[in-house]
Image: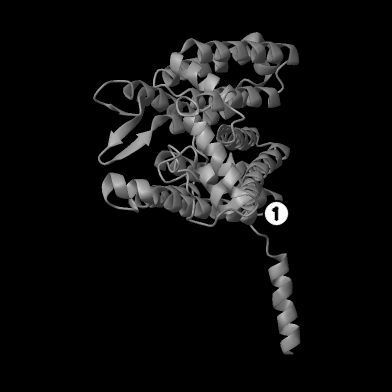
Amino acid sequence: MNSILKKTKMSKRAKTPVLYDRTLLLAVSLLIGVGILMVASASTVIADQQYGNAFHYVYRQLFYLFLGVVAAIILLKLPTKIWLHLGPVCLLLSFILLIAVLIPGIGHSVNGSRRWLGIGPFGFQVSELAKLSFILYMAGYLVRQADAVKTKIGGFIKPMIVVSLLGILLLGEPDFGAAVVITATALGLLFLAGVRLSLFFALVVLVAILLSALAISSPYRMARLTSFLHPWANQFDSGYQLTQSLIAFGRGGWLGVGLGDSIQKLFYLPEAHTDFLFAVLTEELGLAGALFLLLLFGIIVTRAFQIGRRAWFLERSVQAYMGYGFGLWIGLQTLINLGVNMGVLPTKGLTLPFVSYGGSSLLINCIVMAILLRMDHENRMIEFGLAHKSTYE
């Protein structure tokens, strides 16, 4: 009798559908955990010197994580259809805040870049909100103007005008990295939307020319470009940060020098807990740790595209483009950050999503994952016949 009851319970469990993406949730949780651990390892020495509190940056990161988790819990309850209407509103808010951050007395400047709005003792980087807002806007636009995007020049010129305006404001901060991510994401979404290849490649060439011109027109960007090409020629000047990063990679070897035992974080590698945290991670955890991190990012990006693809087959086009956009954004920013750390790309002020110190980035990334998980939940509800598609439209 007991064996029969056990079998009945097991069969019921087997038939009970899983209504959320456990793989995505696990990968994000592990990535955030690794991030908090590495921020603690990389920032304690500099935090103790600057603030007299070795865990200053860890506490701040945990505070933003708390805000992100609370926001995620709230957004998990909201149907994703609301973003079709909120996308343009969020984009307008982003424009207003990007203008506000350039106004002296309102915007907060760090290391010569005016990218933050001060909120008491905390700051918020507006470019992170701009990335999210633009993807939400693009998802709605590509559905509303589906025919125009595929057949008319104006169909893909209009979103690029929006990209240009965002780029101008971001370059005024300056935040060249965020402008590149938004532009590349826009091009990727237009390609997926079916824009004519001749126009698409012409646009890609034009954008590449403009970005190259911007890169060489500014003295500080030109210095970064030359130091990237020949870092060891000026290893104690313009190439200092990159050479110290490469030394960290060399010291890491296969298994690393051990958690907490990095030498480069001891005032040798600038921004060790922010943009160059991956170099410290590789020094302490070696190639094995780096590959584990890449595996987690690969899972997140893959799941984002899979969720978008499932939404597309369920004829939920807005959600599909949102999933594709989030996957492109996280993937591109990760590749750029890793490329900068390894000397493959010129230095950009971009955090490693979920991992690097940066409260605004962590908060917005938590919101993005909440939207993705909600999208996946709705997809599963429809696929399992537990809800009709009209429920979420």
> Image height check: is 373 above or below 18?
above
Q: Residue at x 50, y 30 (%)?
A: 131
Q: Residue at x 60, y 14 (%)?
A: 207
Residue 290 location (% of width, % of height): 62, 48
Residue 193 location (% of width, % of height): 68, 25
Residue 36 visible in the picture: yes
Dot 1, how many residues are within 10 Å of its Cα: few (below 14), some (14-19), or many (20+)? few
Which residue is most to the bottom?
1
Quarter of the image with the N terminus is bottom right
Between 77 and 111, the one nearer to me in the picture: 111
Q: Please state which amino acid type lies under the numbered disc 1.
A: Phe
Relative placement, left or right, of 261 versus 328 is left
Between 228 and 105, the one nearer to me in the picture: 228
Relative placement, left or right, of 97 versus 282 is left
Between 166 and 36, the one nearer to me in the picture: 36
Relative placement, left or right, of 165 versus 111 is right
Residue 363 location (% of width, % of height): 44, 43
Q: Identify the image's colour scheme: rainbow, by chain, secondary structure or one colour.
A: one colour
Residue 141 visible in the picture: no
Q: Quadrant of residue 148?
A: top right
Q: Residue at x 69, y 23 (%)?
A: 191
Tag count: 1
> Image height check: is 35 above or below 326?
below
Q: Residue at x 40, y 30 (%)?
A: 126
Q: Which element is circle 1 on?
A: loop
* Residue with the mark numbered 1: 384
Between 153 and 65, the one nearer to me in the picture: 65
